[in-house]
Image (cartoon, helix red, strand yellow):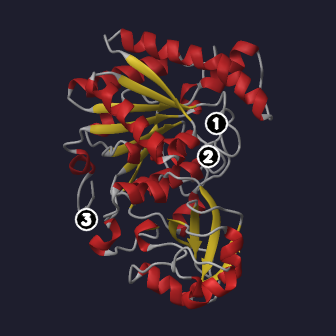
Amino acid sequence: MNRKVNNKGLSRKQLLKGIKRAVIKVGSGVLAGRDGLNRKVINDLTEDICGLRKKGIEIVLVSSGAIASGLKKLGLSKRPESISHKQAVAAIGQSSLMLAYERAFARHNQKVAQILITRDDFNHRGRYLNARNTIFTLLSWKIVPIINENDTVVVDEIKFGDNDNLSAMVTNLMEAQVLINLTDLDGLYDKDPRIHKDARLIKVVEKVNREILRYASSIPGFLGTGGMASKITAAQKVALSGIPAIIANGSKRGILKALFQGKEEGTIFLPQDSNLCSRKRWIAFTKAPRGKIVVDRGAEKAIVERGKSLLPSGIKQVVGNFSVGDSVVVLNEDNHELAVGLVNYYSEEVRKIMGLKTTQIEAKLGSKHEDEVIHRDNLAITNNVELGEEACR
């Protein structure tokens, strides 16, 4: 599904009117309580979710909280540092988290399902589609899927990094119409409100830019891994797919009901004009990049303005090690991201042919896979410049 939006002058109520599917992410800071989990908050959120379900809105819930719950069970005062210890704590806490949700939803005769995902599931196109089909099946059965990163098996190479990133991926995976990120703050401020009393809440973000990124605090909460910076990044990803995102305070009773009524709670990130097809959204925002390629001004203009492929002649630098078919980030000379694409050559091969003409590739490598280092059909522009229908070939 391609998305073309025109959000100019639309109120929140108009933007959220007619929503049929939403992804709701709940952070550890919202769920944490004296006994590990804040049952009152969970009960309040499930009541709101069930109310939305009765109105015909499908809800996919992305929930943190496994480690927070496990810490209390073990009597630990802080998150462990090592991966293996985090995995063990998550394994202990995950069952309590799901039990709390199951009991809360059961009060409203609503069934739930647990889905644990690693980034590797998203990197593989087939498994990506299988996950999508499973969640669609659950929704068709009127069941609320509750998704979490599989902390018990995740390693550095395949982890999402935080559930903010995961929620953005799930939003694109399910072609949801809004992402609501519930945190322990009222939204995005121009300063960290935990430090500055004069911090001002930003109610609307038309487009994520350098100023907005400067506002974000990269300091995570006590129990979570994602600070405000990761929430902004997640909002930017879905906005570039033509989907609005809202960051709001999940501790406020009735917050979801208020948001869907169009009340100005939290910070809304307006959707951007987008025509990325589902495959290019997968390339741009889901498949984990394995390296970076820096291009010159000529290549930048060809890629962004004319929708051309990336040729070796425009490449100035290669960062990291990657294989054929891996995802890489394309940067300009100012180190700003332009696009994400799937490469036709190994990183070492690209280093050897960068700056060369396509006619020189075979002589340099002994063979030639393709003329293009990244073909335009495998290149997703991420700097929010429209390329017309060419983007979804």
The residue tagged 1 is 224
How far from the left and from the top, in percent, is residue 352?
A: 71, 80
Left or right placement of residue 277 versus residue 284 in this view: left
Residue 205, visible in the rendered structure: yes
Spatial separation of the CA atoms under disc 2 and disc 1 = 8 Å
The residue tagged 3 is 8
Q: Which residue is located at x 40 percent, y 44 percent? A: 173
From the image, state whether disc 1 or disc 3 is nearer to you. Answer: 1
Indicate the secondary structure of the residue bearing disc 3: loop
Q: Nearer the viewer, residue 46 or 299?
A: 299
Q: Which residue is located at x 21 percent, y 29 percent? A: 56
The C terminus: image quadrant: bottom left
Q: Which mark is residue 15?
A: none
Q: Tally the numbered discs.
A: 3
Would you identify the image quadrant in which residue 306 lies?
bottom left
Q: Which residue is located at x 46 percent, y 73 percent? A: 375
First along the sequence among labels 3 and 2: 3
Residue type highlighted by circle 2: Gly
Q: Nearer the viewer, residue 27 or 83?
A: 83
How far from the left and from the top, in percent, is residue 349?
A: 68, 74
Q: Nearer the viewer, residue 206 or 99?
A: 99
Indicate the secondary structure of the residue bearing disc 1: loop
Above or below — where is 361 with respect to 50?
A: below
Residue type highlighted by circle 1: Gly
